[in-house]
Amino acid sequence: MQPFTKEVIDIIAAIPEGRVMTYGQVAKLAGSPRGARQVVRVLHTMSRKHQLPWHRVINAKGEIAIKDSEASHEQCLLLENEGLEVLGNKVDLKAYQYHPDKKKA
């Protein structure tokens, strides 16, 4: 496994319940500030294997970015079940964005 991939997995696994991070934020913390698309790839291919809380990663606008309506709805429900308010597939980043201690992430 590539070091970036391992970092992405570790960062996503550490997002606490009721909080979200953006794809770009995860990429930057993992050492690749322009690697948001790679974060998407890791989520797509490794969420199930590593039991990642994939639903806690959203885009920089605070939106659920999944195009498939069923998966998008599932992400919305999972976030709401954790206490987040989701309005029109959008989460208030100011209220719910997680900012981990950079020394730990």
Image (cartoon, rainbow, N blue to C red):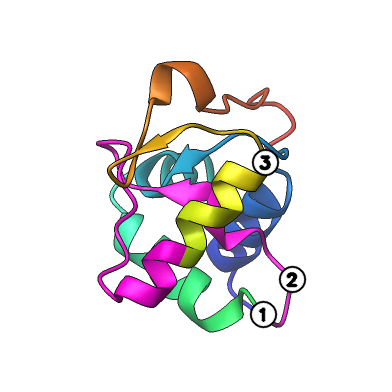
Residue 16, percent across and down?
72, 38
In the image, what residue type sits under mark 1?
Arg
Which residue: 65% across, 58% down?
A: 53
Q: Secondary structure at mark 1?
A: loop
* 67 and 40: which is toward the camera: 67
24 falls in the magenta region: no
In the image, what residue type sits under mark 2?
Gln
Among the 4 quarters of the image, the one containing residue 62: top left
* 42 and 16: which is toward the camera: 16
Q: Which residue is mark 1?
A: 48
Q: Secondary structure at mark 3?
A: loop
Range of residues picked out in magenta: 49-73
Work out which residue is located at the far top of the displayed protein and give it.
Answer: 94
In the image, what residue type sits under mark 3?
Glu
Report the quarter where the C terminus lies: top right
In the displayed structure image, the side of residue 60 where residue 38 appears, left or right: right
Which residue: 29% across, 58% down?
A: 65
- Tell me whether circle 1 and circle 3 mark residues in contact (CB < 8 Å): no
Residue 18, percent across and down?
65, 35
Query: Few, some or many C-alpha atoms within 10 Å of disc 2 (few <14, some 14-19, many ≥20)?
Result: few
In the displayed structure image, the side of residue 59 where residue 7 appears, left or right: right
Front: mark 2 or 3? 3
53 falls in the magenta region: yes
Residue 58, percent across and down?
40, 48
Q: Which residue is mark 2?
A: 51
Report the quarter where the N terminus lies: bottom right
Query: Few, some or many C-alpha atoms within 10 Å of disc 3 (few <14, some 14-19, many ≥20)?
Result: few
